[in-house]
Image (cartoon, helix red, strand yellow):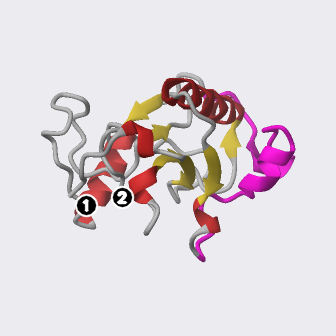
């Protein structure tokens, strides 16, 4: 079950992918169902009414059309990266290793917004920096060093605004 934390302890963002086929529509609600099957639990009393999702381990999900869905509140410890959850924010991109340009833009805007909200400079990592997994499907340090420009091989072609 997620525990309450002070926002002042948050020092990083960890990026994940949903391990879903590239270019296919999936939602935060579906991730919530998958996490329920894995027995992730939340303490819904931490921020009543914040999100109807009862099991999701991430704080945010960026859907294929760029919609940012809230999962856990920042005040609640996530369930996304073993050993790193108490001080990090989990952001999940729908897809596997190619993401729509709107997802890339929203990811950067969300990180910048979190930096502003928390009045800090958050370290940004990929889940694969703490685990043998391939998640998030791209090299986060390389993305940062390229001034947050994704490599062409990680860009999903097409306009996904308003996809259902």
The answer to which image quadrant residue 80 occupies is: bottom left
Q: Are marks 2 and 1 in contact (CB under 8 Å)?
A: yes
Q: Position of residue 11 (x, y in %)?
A: 53, 46
Q: Residue at x 64, y 66 (%)?
A: 129
Report how far apart the C-alphas of labels 2 and 1 lie in the structure: 7 Å
Pick out the residue farthest to the left: 45
User: In the picture provided, is 138 more to the left or to the right than 36?
Assistant: right
Q: Mark 1 falls on what kind of element?
A: loop
Q: Which residue is mark 2?
A: 79
Residue at left offset 78%, top offset 45%: 144
- Quadrant showing the N terminus: bottom left
4 or 33: nearer the eye? 4
Q: In front: 31, or 46? A: 46
Position above or below: 111 against 81: above
Tell me what residue is drawn at x 32 percent, y 39 percent: 75
**Quarter of the figure with residue 36:** bottom left
Question: Residue 65 lies in magenta, yes or no?
Answer: no
- Is the residue marked by circle 2 packed among few (<14), some (14-19), or many (20+) residues within 10 Å? many
Residue 40 coordinates in the image, percent (x, y): 25, 61
Tell me which secondary structure the magenta stretch mostly adopts: loop
Establish if 133 lies above or below 78.
Answer: below
Residue numbers of the magenta segment: 132-160
Residue 124 point in image, percent of width and height: 64, 48
Report helix, strand or loop for mark 2: loop
Please tell me whether residue 157 belongs to the stretch shown in magenta.
yes
Q: Quick one: label 2 or label 1, which is nearer the N terminus? A: 1
> Left of 24 or right of it: where is 98?
right
Q: Nearer the viewer, mark 2 or mark 1?
A: 2
Q: Along the line of sight, which residue is nearer the eye, 161 or 102?
A: 102
81 with respect to 54 (left or right): right
Q: Which residue is mark 1?
A: 40
Residue at 68%, 27% in the rendered image: 159
């Amino acid at each position: 079950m997620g525990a309450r934390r002070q926002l002042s302890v948050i020092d990083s963002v960890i990026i994940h992918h949903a391990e879903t086929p590239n270019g296919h529509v999936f939602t935060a609600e579906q991730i919530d169902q998958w996490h329920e099957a894995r027995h992730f639990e939340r303490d819904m009393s931490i921020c009543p009414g914040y999100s109807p999702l009862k099991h999701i381990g991430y704080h945010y999900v960026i859907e294929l059309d760029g919609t940012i869905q809230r999962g856990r509140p920042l005040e609640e410890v996530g369930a996304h990266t073993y050993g790193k959850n108490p001080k990090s924010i989990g952001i999940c991109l729908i897809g596997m290793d190619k993401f729509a340009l709107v997802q890339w833009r929203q990811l950067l805007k969300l990180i910048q917004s979190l930096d502003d909200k928390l009045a800090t400079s958050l370290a940004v990592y990929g889940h694969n920096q703490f685990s043998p997994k391939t998640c998030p499907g791209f090299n986060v340090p390389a993305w940062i060093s390229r001034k947050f420009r994704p490599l062409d091989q990680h860009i999903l072609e097409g306009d996904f605004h308003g996809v259902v």
